[in-house]
Amino acid sequence: MTSIDAKIPSGALKDKWTSHKNNINLVNPANKRLIDVIVVGTGLAGGSAAATLAELGYNVKAFAFQDSPRRAHSIAAQGGINAAKNYQGDGDSIYRLFYDTVKGGDYRSREANVYRLAEVSANIIDQCVAQGVPFARDYGGLLDNRSFGGVLVSRTFYAKGQTGQQLLLGAYSAMNRQIGRGKIKMYNRHEMLDVVVIDGKARGIIARDLVTGKVERHSAHAVVVGSGGYGNVFFLSTNAMGSNVSAAWKVHKKGAYFANPCFTQIHPTCIPVAGELQAKLTLMSESLRNDGRIWVPKNMEDVKAIRAGQLKPTQLTEDKRDYYLERRYPAFGNLVPRDVASRAAKERCDAGYGVNQTGQAVYLDFASAIARYGKETAHVQGLDENDQALVTKLGKAVIANKYGNLFQMYEKIVDENPYESPMMIFPAVHYTMGGIWVDYNLMTTIPGLYAIGEANFSDHGANRLGASALMQGLADGYFVLPYTIGDYLSHDIRTGPIPTDHQAFADAEKDVVERLDHLINNKGTKSVDNFHRRLGHIMWEKCGMARNREGLVSAISEIQALRDEFWKDVKVPGGRNEFNEELAKAGRVADYLELGELFAKDALLREESCGGHFREESQSDDGEAKRDDENFKYVAMWEYTGNPADAILHKEDLVYENIELKTRSYK
Amino acid sequence: MNLTLKIWRQQNSNDKGKMVDYQISDVSGDMSFLEMLDVLNEDLITKDDTPVSFDHDCREGICGMCSLQINGEPHGPDKGVTTCQLHMRSFKDGDTIYIEPFRAKAFPIIKDLVVDRSAFDRIQQSGAYVSVNTSGNTQDANNIPVPKEDADMAFDAATCIGCGACVAACKNSSAMLFVSAKVSQFALLPQGKVEGKKRVQDMVAQMDAEGFGNCSNTGACEAECPKGISLENIARMNRELISAKLAVKH
């Protein structure tokens, strides 16, 4: 095992970032024009990085597999973005945001990175407002806040249930300004299929034009991967259909270490699975837990009656309901962190109290919030607070104003009115905390290759708090990477353009083309989706909300067998030199079939429960996660050596100098 | 339920294209429209036929990638939803469903039901931004109070997902609703006012250059918009444009 240098600056925690910025090398404006940077992915991280690097003067080439940068899946983030502004005067501070994030991540993230994230969080809000992002405001015209899970302050800024959309459109507008100026060259409908490493440095990528099928070489002085997470390894997740691990996995195979692949977030409030042919799951924002109360019936006969359609949830009186989060976690109640809420839902459903046909659903109920808001509004307007019908009507209007689009989404999918009857929800795969390992500068173990946003591993430990993904994506792209990349590029001012006729480009292109041809020529009997569904099933059953040794060992061999079968029997219609969605999908699923194995291997190694990673062997008497700091207080970094089974483990020990390690409790 | 699908098939941009009939059975009302097409494609692949290409990504009505003219209506018969949010319970057993791409001169067909909407990007690049660098060294966010009504209206305009349904619904293939939504978002906010006059003129010029038609005043765009973007935005954009053109230059 080699020793890992995360390049964390020395000095006091609160001074690290400032002094680091003051001491790193800069590239002068004239020289920036001589330097090219490739950015893969145009979500909040990639989009904001591309725009900022172009503003600084670098020549940026940005790549998106969608038809426009605006479609990246950050667009679907709903609830909000955290920032330590303390506008509510409720005791928030940079330190508190830092502390909440480290604790929320169950002490498996890097202190210095998280502190920097909290430090720049306030700038994000200033920046977005300056760009014209229409955040929610109160009647005084100032910005409004809401609460999210795992914290005791209101620090979440939002734009109804479409915060990700508004922030991404902000980053997209900043990109558009630079595309208009010619400083960003945008490659839409292009997919990165390999990274090109020359003399140990990342110098370009191989990409496929998804419209013509042409395989292209693109060179640069540095490559930035902001390609998002890999939740779709589970087939069913809240990710977009096209979300994939391929860019991240390709760089891993070229030498970038992959960190904590088993750290996955299973989000507690999603619309339950409806049928075998379902292709994706839909999130109901965590912000709903500000006002929604989660429950199942207390008595089994009521559960049975509900499932049989003989009883409606609204007919159950308060004493017959089990608000299990409020019961188990009185301090945080419905706003416990996501991993805790998900496990608690699983516990009730496993015990037989699930409320839909499959027994895999719990209620999220807005009746008390509607009554509370209705009374308040009636009082403010001087109306009759005892008029039930009026109060309900006024209350529904308040709820509609806060979460209208979410309620509409729910009704469209489930065909039930959530204003009248409680929503049914169940946990679903949502986010991956694991990712490409990066140092403090966001550089991977390949010099000149950077990873930002969900694609990297650094800030959320074993569980991400709500409204922190948007914060991290924009922090990395707007405020961190543009500084740290300059330090590296300052050595490249005399390099000149990187030629694409180098042997490394030819070799990488050859590998890519051979693989595509193999997939086309395989002419097996089963579709790509067939394999993807089966992989997802293994992952969900054995690497999902609860994991154990036996299951993980079996998952590894099942995934290996499925991968062999895939390469022998997958059927990809059409040709390589044309618009061919099945071919694109096949390449992504091939990568998931490798990542899935590493994921299970990582979960098997980590014989502790922490955050979203719950090993059944490691739990307290009351079923809470039991962390093992003595043996597992490290980042597991995997080095690729030709096969996921042979990946070599390296460890970055996590040092806590500013936070005392404690058992995480939300009781 | 069992359905007959009549789907536009076109190999590439040079191909002439034609409607092709498909039968699909055992469709459940709880399936989304795109899941129904997934099932069709799975079946076509099994039969060594070519699957139907269509654009889609988030499948929750926010990315704007999905399109489709379904029985002549962009995003199908339901109001306020995208095609990915449309569920098969909106159809009944024995129905024939016509599935075509969004048709507009400015949206050339790439393959089957997939069209090129990059004209929308180019309109945005012509001025749909506030010229502020992303340094973060701006003023504190609360130094710019915005009346709640203005902020809410700006937000409503900003919820446009750029899908192109407005263009597909319009007999003139006008992009006025799309362009006016962005113009309005900035026109309603103090941050956007500084460059307002230049922005509206540049964006409208680019819209015309892309080959979109003129506003037909029929309101078809608003009726078909999955996000309910209001026609008032078009009126606002016209006001902005006139006042920009009348502005005296010093």
Image: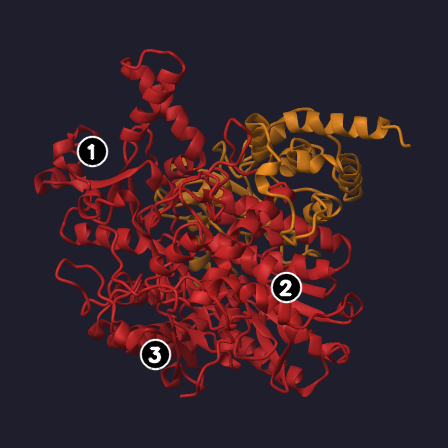
Chain colours: A red, B orange
For residue A560, the mark is: 3
Q: Quadrant of the N terminus of chain B?
A: top left
Residues at circles 3 and 1 in contact by the CB criterion of under 8 Å: no
- Quick one: which residue is furthest to the front in this view? A12
Q: Label 2: state its secondary structure.
A: helix
The numbered mark, 2 or 3, whose residue comes first in the sequence reads: 2
**Rendered-image quadrant of the C terminus of chain B:** top right
Q: Which residue is mark 1?
A: A313
Marks 1 and 2, Cα distance to the nearest angstrom?
Answer: 53 Å
Q: Residue at x 43, y 66 (%)?
A: A111
Point out the tag, 1 or 2, that comes first from the N-terminus.
Answer: 1
Residue A394 point in image, percent of width and height: 37, 20
Using the image, name the chain to which the residue with label 2 belongs.
Answer: A
Q: Amino acid at mark 3?
A: Gln
Is residue A208 depicted above or below A328 in this figure?
below
Distance in Å between CA atoms under marks 2 and 3:
40 Å
Earlier in the chain: of badge 3 and badge 1, it is 1
Residue with the mark numbered 2: A482
* Amino acid residing under circle 1: Pro
Residue A213 visible in the snapshot? no
Q: Is residue B144 left or right of residue A541?
A: right
Co-location on one chain, circles 2 and 3: yes
